[in-house]
Structure formats: structure tokens, C-alpha cells
Image (cartoon, rainbow, N blue to C red):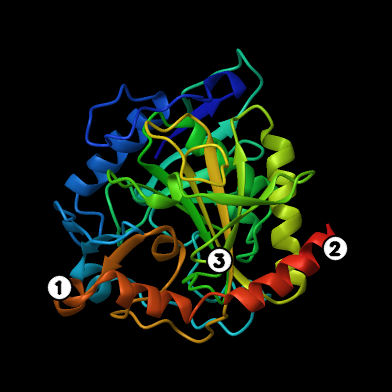
Amino acid sequence: MEIRVLTYSSEDLVCEAGGPDLKTTHTPSTFDLMLRSSWAEKMSRGLFRYHLGDLETKALPGELGYVAQLNIQRGTERRKPQEILSLRQNFDPKLFNFNRIKQEEVLFDMCRVQPSSTEETHTGPCAGTCRVLINVSPLERGHCLLVPEPARCRPQLLTTPALQVGLESVFLSADPGYRVGFNSLGAFASVNHLHLHGYYLNHPLRVQWAPTALVEPRMGLYRLGFPNGFMFYTDGQDLPVTVANICKLTDILVDRNIAHNVFMTRGCPPSPVPGSRPLPGGVRVFVWPRVSCFGAKEESGFNVALCELAGHLPFKNRKDFESIDEDGVKSIVQKYVFNDQEFDALQKQIVELL
């Protein structure tokens, strides 16, 4: 089967992406068109574990603006998560990995090239290729997996090339509802094969404009209040520097055996007060150090990972979906993230190391 390839260069990055009304139709980019059309075609062919219709969605009252969605089949129909025992667990070729998927589950390949160098299809992976796959148990429309050079069989440890392609995919999208995230081992990653998640969520999230405090100016490192986490911001002009700084932080967390979740979304520039809307075209990248959770994750439970920390709450049973409120969510989330005292101590250590 011939695999489509999206070749792109720095000239294709979209520096402005719509306004706050995510239900407004935006002029899609080439990336958006390829992802949406390929994803819809795979859904029509029944390649997912369930048909994803319009999810029941509601905004929880409160200052944090949580977006709750009911997706029961993700809890009942998804592939059994792997048992994770360590943040540095080695890749195991005997377990499920993304080299074992059906070729029909491949959406396309992404390959960065120099400006003016283009092609539309290829018969084999090019150097540095990122394979884009369907997530067979989708959270939302367009839910895909970004798997950098899958044949290299890297474990789920964030690398500079992986972070770069994830961040570039956000800038390749003209839709402000497109988000990308990463769960480390011990942070509810389900498969120990290097990958990121990408998906569309047509609802604004508070983290896109939440106030932040400057921590380390040379690194462009900021702090988010609740849930306690770090933030970086880029307008697309300094991607390699931003990527390098983020990886310095995640490398420190790995060295200290601290699990973490990463979330990338369009948002306002850093500010000590809530940012403005409509949202400018830059991207906020959040890194949440968190309490490690090892073993196999509960498939029907409320697992606090990249979505939940960002304010997107996928529920797998109606009882929780209908009964939860903001205080209830905050009490659950706080069990998995560092409290103020713990975070202050970690922040001090990280600034000294940086």
C-alpha cells in the first residue's frame, strides 16, 4: 500500500490560527485537510474499535472552565494498557508496539524538508519520518498518534526530534482546536513505544490564557498555578531553542525519576494576569511533574494524564460524568500533581540545575 507523505518546511508553519470561537469554520491548512480526510476515511471503513459520534459535552461551572465529555466506549473497547513498572522501562519487542499495526491504520507520514522541496507520495520512509497513525480508541475527532521513526523502537522517553515534530504539527494546523500531548511512563502512558497524541477539541481551555509567573528568563520558563506546572511559549520563530529548553527540563525530570505530562496548544503570550481573547497565534507548552502511577491503568477509571491536567475531562461512565463538579475534579487532580511546597522545592532545584 502506498503511504501518503506530508512534506513541509518552515514556510508552511501557520503563525496565526483563528480566534476564540472554536466552532467557527476556519480555513484549513494542508495538514488539517490531510489529517481530517484520512481520519474520516478510516472511520468510514470501520478501522476503529468503535464509531465516534458527537460526544456529550458540558462545561463545568467554575473558574477553571473544565470541559467534560462522555466517551463510554473508550473505557470498554480500547486495547488493554501495558503494565508499566519504571520511568526508564526498556522497549520490549514482544509486547504490542506501533510496528505491529495494520498498514491500513497509517494516516500518512510527515517529513520536514528544505523550503521548495516537495513531494506528495512515497513508497518507503524517508530520513527522520514521523508516522501518523489513527488511535483506534479515539478521544475526539482526528485523534492520532505521532510516532517518530517507529522502526527505531525507542521507549516512551521524550526526545528532541519527537518534541520538535509534535510542536511543528501544532504550527502546521490552522485550527486553534488542534492539541498535542505526551504522557511519560508512570504518567499513564499505555504503550512503551515513543509516541505523542494529537487531536481536535472544539472547546476553549483555560490553560490557553491562564496567568503565569516568570521563573527563569533565560530559559523562557514560566509557572502555572493550578495544577502546578511549568510553561514555555513560542511564536514559531524560535522553535529549536524552545524545543531544546523544554527537553532540558524533561531530561532533569527523567534523571530524578519524576513522571510528567506535556500538553501543547495555541494560546496567549505569558502574562501574570489572564490573557486576552481572541487568542494570538503562539503556542503554549505545559510540562506537569506529577506523582508516578505504575502498573496497568484502570480502563474505566478517571486517569489524570495530559488531557485532564489541561482541563479536558474524558469520562468513561455516565455516573461520574453527571455527578462531578469543579471541586471534585480539583480534589482528584491534586492527588496526582505536586502540592505548592513540593513544587516550590522542585522549582528551586530545577532553576539551580538550569
Name the residue located 46 percent from the left edge and 29 percent from the top edge. Answer: 280
Rendered position, 348 above or below 35 = below
Would residue 101 be found to the left or right of residue 93 on screen? left
Q: Residues within 10 Å of mark 1 (few under 14, many from 20)?
A: few
Name the residue located 15 percent from the left edge and 79 percent from the top edge. Answer: 319
Q: CA distance from mark 3 to mark 1?
A: 27 Å
Q: Which residue is mark 1?
A: 322
Name the residue located 51 percent from the left edge and 32 percent from the top edge. Answer: 171
Q: Are marks 3 and 1 in contact (CB under 8 Å)?
A: no
Q: Are marks 2 and 3 in contact (CB under 8 Å)?
A: no
Viewer-nearest residue: 80 or 142: 142
Which amino acid type corresponds to the residue marked 2 in the rendered image?
Answer: Glu
Under tag 1, what secondary structure? helix
Q: Which mark is residue 249?
A: none
Viewer-nearest residue: 31 or 246: 246
Q: CA distance from mark 2 to mark 3?
A: 19 Å
Which quadrant of the structure image shows residue 347?
A: bottom right
Would residue 149 be found to the left or right of residue 319 on screen? right
Q: Which residue is mark 2?
A: 352
Q: Residues within 10 Å of mark 3 (few under 14, many from 20)?
A: many
Quadrant location of the N terminus? top left
Q: Which residue is mark 3?
A: 228
